[in-house]
């Protein structure tokens, strides 16, 4: 309490206050500045390699210049789509269990497990996928999808939990007072109001796992130089191309790495920003300005926490 | 007669619907419980599989793997000390740099920024977390690296060369760029969680402090920081957890070298980057198991850090009576 006593000359206290405010502003400028520097340098260096061939052709066989990484775009699209198709239903079911059915202790256990899962480095998840699946069934795009689904699961489930928690209790009570059974209440009354939030939460998770590289290293690297649509064969991916090209001494491959990074970054930023905007809107619609704001902060913190945790 | 059939109709309908509802209730409950069981099982499975895969190395080297320095695939001898040192040093310094910046951003976003700026800056900082680490690594190797070698390290050497940390020849890669890359990754995590915490401070407390005539900074020091202290520690721990496990970007910049170096200019290696680098070249059974052993050590580190953070957050939430 004594720390709340104002002491010292007013001018000095005000000066100190201004200095601290300045430092807080500076910190934010640094963070935004670094994002700007990364995005701008990726854009500038990507321009020479961004052409039609880059998206439609594969790498030339004998290392001559030109060509592109079409197979990586196709591979990443397939792998991420399958990962989302797995993580979405499982994540939503877990969220329904946790917020509608489970007794408090069990709910806490499941939520804590998901939080811990969210904190496991993705390279460890890659090792897990490798030891459990790849050693037995060999590499394939599908193995990568499974690993990415494990990474996406806590994110999807967390955002679904947050929107479910915002659905007013009165809605559930009204439904049950009309004699509607629990499962109908959950599936046809509660869930539809949260649909927007769940879809955008999944989109955010997809944007996040699309750039994951560590699990890819263990599950789908032995791809051929042709465009393949078969998820049960190893597929090329955009993050792995960037990783290998960044360590190559060839400046042409550097250019292609920048171009691939540009496409990846634009995909991630645009989907994240628009999904974030939509999520914000649906949270606010559900529960008004302030609570919506807090729920969004919680969801975004959960996403930031996992980061792109390679 | 008519009345009795009319009465049986709805009742039959009702019982059919009742049966369907009972089945529906059980089915939905079972399905959701199963999904939750799968989620928990995945977590248990990860721990089990990693220990299982490392078992040959655990059996062969025992716990002394953790403090042995030699990592020599030619002699098939493996120890993790260099890598534990590399992980601990890079993550710790990165946290030291990122902590004040993260807290300051959290404060700026909740207390200072005008309404419009708040949303924009807040989402931009979160976007920094969304930049894939392979892209940060690419930038780290090709843009940050040359800058560190030509500009940053010579300056640090001139100013702080009297300490043991800033000596030796400048490199494009090494511990210093790894630390910078890791702090870039910690900041968005810790700042967005700090911001979430600062939002929970009751308006009355803040207004009370202003009513006593305090400046904004005095209010922050007297009200917000004491109120959220535990949570801020947790936010930093979660950032640290992220840094410990970061593999890709660190692999790209750190230079994969052996040995324990005090100077930040030196090349090094971390647990995660060694795994990412060598799993394909692992020739012997023991080499593979040793890499998985590294993953097990890393898993223990990140579990300890994350669970500690969770415990602090839970206690914090209970204390505040809000969940």
Image (spheres, coloured by chain):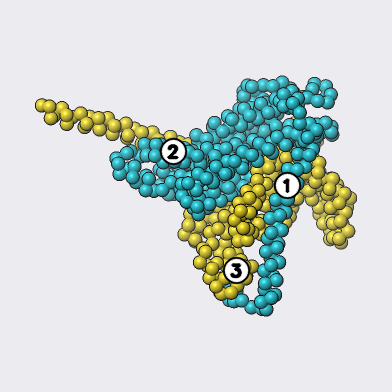
Chain colours: A cyan, B yellow
In the rendered image, residue A106, in percent from the top left (x then y), is placed at: 44, 46
Q: Residue at x 50, y 46 (%)?
A: A283
Q: Is residue B128 left or right of residue A89?
A: right
Q: Nearer the viewer, residue A82 or B208?
A: B208
**Residue B178 to residue B57: above or below:** below
Quarter of the image for residue A210 reads top right
Residue on which disc 2 sits: A192
Q: Are circles 3 and 1 on residues that touch, CB within 8 Å?
A: no
**Dividing the image into 4 quarters, which one contains the C terminus of chain A?**
top right
In the rendered image, residue A217, in percent from the top left (x then y), is placed at: 69, 33
Q: Are marks 3 and 2 on the same chain?
A: no
Residue on which disc 1 sits: A36
Query: Distance between the Cα atoms at labels 3 and 2?
Result: 43 Å
Q: Please tell me whether mark 3 or mark 1 is closer to you in this view.
A: 1
Crowd class of label 1 (few under 14; some 14 to 19; many from 20; radius 10 Å): some
Res. B219 mark: 3
Q: Nearer the viewer, residue B264 or A70?
A: A70
């Amino acid at each position: 309490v004594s720390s709340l006593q104002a002491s010292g000359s007013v001018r000095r206290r005000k000066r100190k206050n201004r200095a601290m405010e300045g430092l807080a502003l500076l910190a934010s400028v640094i963070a935004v500045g670094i994002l700007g520097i990364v995005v701008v340098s990726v854009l500038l260096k990507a321009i020479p390699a961004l052409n039609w061939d880059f998206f439609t052709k594969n790498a030339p066989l004998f290392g001559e210049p030109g060509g592109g990484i079409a197979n990586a775009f196709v591979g990443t699209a397939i792998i991420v789509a399958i990962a989302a198709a797995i993580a979405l239903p499982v994540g939503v079911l877990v969220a329904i269990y946790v917020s509608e059915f489970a007794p408090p202790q069990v709910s806490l256990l499941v939520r804590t497990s998901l939080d811990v899962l969210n904190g496991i480095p993705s390279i460890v998840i890659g090792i897990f996928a490798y030891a459990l699946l790849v050693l037995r069934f060999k590499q394939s795009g599908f193995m990568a999808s499974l690993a990415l689904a494990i990474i996406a699961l806590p994110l999807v489930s967390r955002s679904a939990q947050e929107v479910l928690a915002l659905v007013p209790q009165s809605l559930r009570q009204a439904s049950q007072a009309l004699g509607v059974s629990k499962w109908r209440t959950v599936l046809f009354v509660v869930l539809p109001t949260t649909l927007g939030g769940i879809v955008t939460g999944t989109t955010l998770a997809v944007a996040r796992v699309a750039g994951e590289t560590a699990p890819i290293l263990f599950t789908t690297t032995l791809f051929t130089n042709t465009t393949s649509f078969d998820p049960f064969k190893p597929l090329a991916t955009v993050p792995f191309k960037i990783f290998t090209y960044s360590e190559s001494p060839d400046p042409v491959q550097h250019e292609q790495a920048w171009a691939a990074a540009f496409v990846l970054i634009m995909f991630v930023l645009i989907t994240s920003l628009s999904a974030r905007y939509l999520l914000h809107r649906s949270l606010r619609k559900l529960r008004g300005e302030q609570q919506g704001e807090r729920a969004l902060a919680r969801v975004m913190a959960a996403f930031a926490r996992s980061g792109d945790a390679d | 007669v008519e009345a009795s059939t009319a009465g049986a109709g709805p009742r039959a309908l009702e019982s059919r619907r009742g049966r369907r509802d009972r089945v529906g209730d059980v089915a939905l409950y079972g399905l959701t419980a199963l999904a939750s069981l799968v989620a928990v099982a995945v977590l248990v499975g990860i721990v089990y599989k990693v220990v299982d895969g490392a078992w040959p190395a655990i059996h062969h080297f025992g716990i002394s793997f953790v403090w042995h320095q030699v990592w020599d695939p030619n002699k098939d001898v493996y120890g993790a000390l260099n890598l534990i040192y590399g992980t601990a040093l890079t993550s710790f310094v990165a946290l030291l740099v990122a902590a004040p910046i993260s807290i300051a951003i959290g404060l700026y976003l909740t207390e200072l920024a005008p309404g419009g700026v708040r949303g924009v800056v807040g989402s931009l900082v979160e976007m920094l977390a969304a930049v894939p680490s392979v892209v940060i690594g690419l930038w780290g190797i090709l843009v940050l690296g040359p800058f560190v070698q030509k500009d940053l390290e010579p300056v640090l050497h001139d100013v702080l060369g009297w300490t043991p940390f800033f000596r030796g020849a400048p490199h494009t890669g090494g511990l210093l760029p790894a630390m910078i890359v890791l702090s870039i990754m910690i900041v968005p995590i810790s700042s967005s969680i700090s911001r979430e915490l600062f939002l929970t401070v009751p308006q009355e407390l803040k207004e009370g402090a202003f009513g006593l005539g305090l400046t904004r900074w005095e209010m922050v020091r007297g009200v917000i920081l004491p109120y959220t202290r535990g949570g801020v520690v947790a936010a930093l721990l979660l950032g640290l957890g992220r840094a410990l496990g970061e593999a890709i970007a660190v692999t790209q910049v750190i230079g994969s070298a052996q040995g324990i170096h005090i100077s930040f200019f030196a090349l090094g290696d971390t647990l995660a980057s060694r795994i990412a680098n060598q799993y394909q070249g692992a020739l012997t059974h023991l080499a593979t198991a040793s890499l998985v052993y590294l993953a097990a050590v890393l898993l223990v580190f990140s579990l300890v850090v994350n669970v500690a953070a969770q415990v602090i957050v839970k206690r914090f939430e209970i204390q505040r009576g809000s969940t």
